Amino acid sequence: MASKPYDPKDFYFRKAHKDGLRARSAYKIEEILDRHRLVSTGGKVLDLGAAPGGWLQIFAKRVGPKGRVIGVDLVPIKPLTELPWVTTAVLDIRSPTLEAELARLDAGPFDLVTSDMAPKTSGIKAQDEARSLELSELALTTAARLLPKGGHFVCKVFMGGDFQDFVRACEAIFAQTRVIRPKATRERSFEHYVVGLSRR
Ligand SMILES: C[S@@+](CC[C@H](N)C(=O)[O-])C[C@H]1O[C@@H](n2cnc3c(N)ncnc32)[C@H](O)[C@@H]1O
């Protein structure tokens, strides 16, 4: 069956606009959170690669004003002034001082660390996959350092040659690992989300 033509303003794009969400990707994390109870009221979340802030809006709703949500990205995130329990910062996950900079935001310990990070794509599939995997591995290293026992992890990964190695690395750190392709994922996308449940 032929795939549908790419529609930048598809159903989820229009729904996000109507629902006041900053990104259509918000529905991906919403589905993951509906399938796995990763965070609850009063919880603390660290979101890596959080701009423009669609996931932050979903986390903020789930944890409520007694919780804390930290979003970091290479680019500034327009402040979510209506959600004062969300803090954002410009940070490069590759920075050697990342942990010190996160510590300065004084937010841990986290219940959930997430990454929807994506590199600027070059159009060269193998190169884009390798860059994506590098970001996913850095997210996993960060989660492994910052999550206490029982903490959870969600990470976008592009399905490619080393995908199974990444899943195995998650399995070594989390009691259970799941791979999810949410309904809002665009048909032609190679992305999947790896969910690490309960840090050992
Ligand atoms: C698909 S967007 C995230 C969308 C977000 N989940 C939302 O709902 O609004 C991917 C983000 O990853 C960020 N990113 C890529 N490389 C990064 C890095 N090294 N450190 C931090 N963020 C990075 C990009 O700047 C981009 O904003």
Image (cartoon, rainbow, N blue to C red):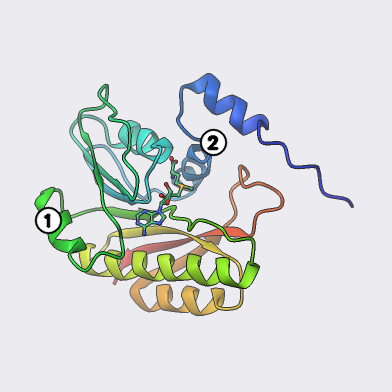
Question: What kind of residue is marked 2?
Answer: Arg
User: Mark 1: is the Cβ under 8 angstroms from ligand 1?
Assistant: no
Q: Secondary structure at mark 1?
A: helix
Graded by Cα atoms within 10 Å as few (under 14), some (14 to 19) or many (20 or more), the crowding at tag 2 reads: many
Pick the residue in front: 141 or 119: 119
Q: Which residue is mark 2?
A: 24
Query: Residue 15's spot in the image, x, y percent?
Result: 58, 26
* Residue situated in front as seen by the camera: 56 or 124: 124
Query: What residue is at 50 percent from the left and 80 percent from the top?
Result: 165
Outermost residue, front side: 122
Residue type pointed to by label 1: Ala
Task: Locate residue 178, reporting x and y percent.
Answer: 50, 64
- What residue is shown at x 12% (from left), y 56% (from top)? 103
Residue sitting nearer the eye, 124 or 33: 124
**Which residue position is annotated with label 1?**
103
Q: Quadrant of residue 69?
A: top left
In the displayed structure, does residue 43 sit left or right of residue 189? left
Can residue 196 be seen in this snapshot? Answer: yes
Q: Gap in Å between the C-alphas at discs 1 and 2?
A: 30 Å
Q: Bin the neighbour count of mark 1 within 10 Å (Cα to Cα): few under 14, some 14-19, many 20 and up.
A: few
Q: Position of residue 153 (x, y in %)?
A: 36, 59
| Residue drawn at the location 30% of the way across and 60% of the way down | 93
- Name the N-terminal-most of marks 1 and 2: 2
- In the image shown, does 109 or 39 lie closer to the viewer? 109
SS assignment at label 2:
loop
